[in-house]
Amino acid sequence: MTSPMPSSLEIAQRATLRPITEIAAAAGLEPDEVEQYGRYQAKVDLSVLERLADRPDAKLINVTAITPTPAGEGKTTTSVSLTQGLGAIGRKPVLCLREASLGPVFGVKGGAAGGGYAQVVPMESLNLHFTGDIHAITAANNLLAAMIDAHIHAGNELRIDPLSISWRRCLDMNDRNLRNVVTGLGGRAHGSPRETGFDITAASEVMALVAVARDLADLRERLGRITIGQTVDGEPVTAEQLRAAGSMAVLLKDAIKPNLVQTLEGQPAFVHCGPFANIAHGNNSLVADRVALKLGEYVVTESGFASDLGMEKFFDIVCRAGNLRPNAVVLVATVRALQHHGGGVEGGLAAIEAGSANLARHIANIRSFGLQAVVAVNKFPTDTQEELDLVRSLALQHGAYAAEVNTAFEDGGKGAAALAEAVVDAAEQPSDFRFLYPLEATIEEKIEAIATRVYGADGVELSPVAKRKAAELAAAGLGELPICMAKTHLSLSDDPKLLNAPTGFTVTVRDLRPYTGAGWIVALCGEMMTMPGLGKTPAAVGIDIDAEGRTVGLF
C-alpha cells in the first residue's frame, strides 16, 4: 500500500538545503555581492547590475492564472515547478516571487512558498518574518504618518489641511477594526483628533514604491514624491516637504535589496516585496527581475491572481517602468476551477466545457498583449485523465500555443518537464509585446480600456467623487500616470458573484487615489477594501508548535 504523501510543511522541514553561498556562486554572483541572512538566505547587493550591465537579458516568462476560486489553483506551485522543470531539462532558470504577508498567512490564503515537491525554502522563514523587509516597510510608512501628526501638533508650518490628509498607517495583518479609526484622543498634549485608518502593509504605497524602484537613489526620490494631503489653499504636500523622505530611505536601504533563497531542487529564487494584486500592482520587485534577467537563461516571474489583475499590471505598470519585454505567459488552470466557473463540480465534463469560457477570456487577454499563452493544467488527485485531456483540448481550441499537464506537486521538477519544454518553445516564437493603452490617454480612457478590453465590460461609470478627482489629477499634471485597478479577484468584473466570463456589466469606480511616489493612480472599484479582515475560523487557529518546538499547521 502506498504511504500517504507528506504535507508541504513536512516536505520542507525534511529537505536538505544547500548553503546559500553555493546557490549564489552557481548563479554567477560574486562573494561581495551576497549578504547572508543565516545559512540559507541572503540579500543581493544591487552593484551586480553594474557589473553585468552588458550581459544580454534572459527570456522573461510571466505566470498568471484564470479567475481564482476558493479552492485555489496552485499558481505559486506552478511557478516553482516550472523553474524546477526548466532545471530538469538542462536550462538555467531563476525564479522571482513576492514575499508572503502575515495577514493572508494567518487568515485564509495560507503560505506563499508553493506546495508539495514544488516549493521554495526555507518555507517557515519565507512565510513569517523572513529578512524583515515587510516590517521595514511598515516602519517607514508609519514614520511618515507620525511626522505628519507631529508637524500639525507643533504649529503646522506647512498649513496642512487636516481634513485633506490621505496618508494612512499600515499593519502587516488582517484587522478590520482598524479600517476606520480616530487618532489623537486624550487632550491637546496627545495630538489633534482626526479620522483616519489603517491599510494592510501589502496595500500601502510604500510597498508599491519599493517594488518598482530601480535602485536606492530612485527609491529616495520616489519617497520624496509621496503626496500626503493638501494645504488649506489646496496645494499638494509631499513627504519631501515634511523632511521625512530621508529617514524613510534609511529604514529601507536594506529592504530594497532582493532576497535570494532556493527551490527544493536547488534553483535560485528571488523572493522580494509583496504588493497585493487586487489592491496594489501585485508583482515582486523590479530590482529582483532586473538582477534575475542578468543571471539566468529564463526568468520565471509570477503575477498575483489572474490575467485581469496581476498580469495586466505587470505589463502596463512594471514592464513600462523597468523597460522589460516578456517573451511568453504561462496560464494556470485546473479541472475543478473550470468546473466551479461552469456551474459546479457535480457538472463533470459539461461544467468544464461551460467554464472554459473563463479560460478563453484569459487566453485572449494574453494574446491581446502580443504574447503566446502556454496553459499549465495543474493536476489534483481527484482529476481523471478524461478531464485533464478535455482541459488541454479546450485550451488549444481557445488559442493557447500549448497546454501541458503539470504533476510537480507530487513529482517535483520532472513532473513539469513537458511544461518547461513548451515554455522554451513558446519563448522562441516571434512576439509583438505591446501595452494596453498609451500614457497620454486621459484617466477615464485608460480605465475604460482596462475594463472593456481586459474585463469584458460594456463600459465604466465613475462616481461623482471619482470624476472630480480625475479632473483635479489631470489639472495637477498627473493625467499621464498609468492606472492600477483595485477590484475583486473573484470575478473578471467588479462583482465577486459574477463567475465565468460575464458580459453586459459596467465597472463602477468609486474613488481615485494618486500614488505619486509609486507613479500611478489607483482606481478603487466596487466595495474593494484596503484592509482585509480575519474570517470566523482563520488559518491562525490551526498553527502551533509541537512538543519538540517545530511549527505545525503552516501551509
Image (cartoon, helix red, strand yellow):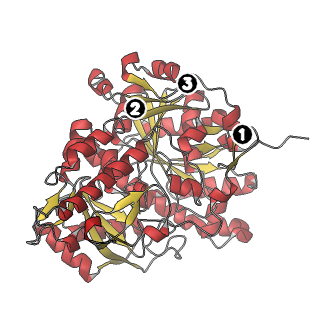
Residue at which label 2 appears: 292
Q: Position of residue 410 (x, y in %)?
A: 71, 41
Quarter occupied by residue 463: bottom left
Measured along the vertical axis of the image, is residue 510 above or below residue 283?
below
Which amino acid type is shown beneath numbered disc 3?
A: Gly
Which amino acid type is shown beneath numbered disc 1?
A: Glu
Total numbered labels placed on residues in the image: 3
Q: Label 3 vs label 1: CA separation? A: 28 Å
Dot 3: what SS?
loop
Q: Position of residue 537 (x, y in %)?
A: 65, 66
Q: Label 1 vs label 2: CA separation? A: 29 Å
Q: Residue at x 26, y 52 (%)?
A: 518
Which amino acid type is shown beneath numbered disc 2?
A: Ala
Q: Is residue 510 left or right of residue 176?
A: left
Q: Is residue 339 left or right of residue 212?
A: right
Residue 432 visible in the shown view: no
Dot 2: what SS?
helix
Residue 50 visible in the shown view: yes
- Front residue of 404/187: it is 187
Measured along the vertical axis of the image, is residue 63 above or below residue 154?
above
Which comes before the other along the chain, label 3 or label 1? 1
Q: Nearer the viewer, mark 3 or mark 2?
A: 2
Residue at which label 3 appears: 90
- Label of residue 32 in the image: none
Residue at which label 1 appears: 10
Q: Residue at x 22, y 78 (%)?
A: 467
Q: Label 3 vs label 2: CA separation? A: 18 Å
**Residue furthest to the left:** 233
Q: Is residue 372 left or right of residue 332?
A: left
Q: Is residue 49 left or right of residue 345?
A: left
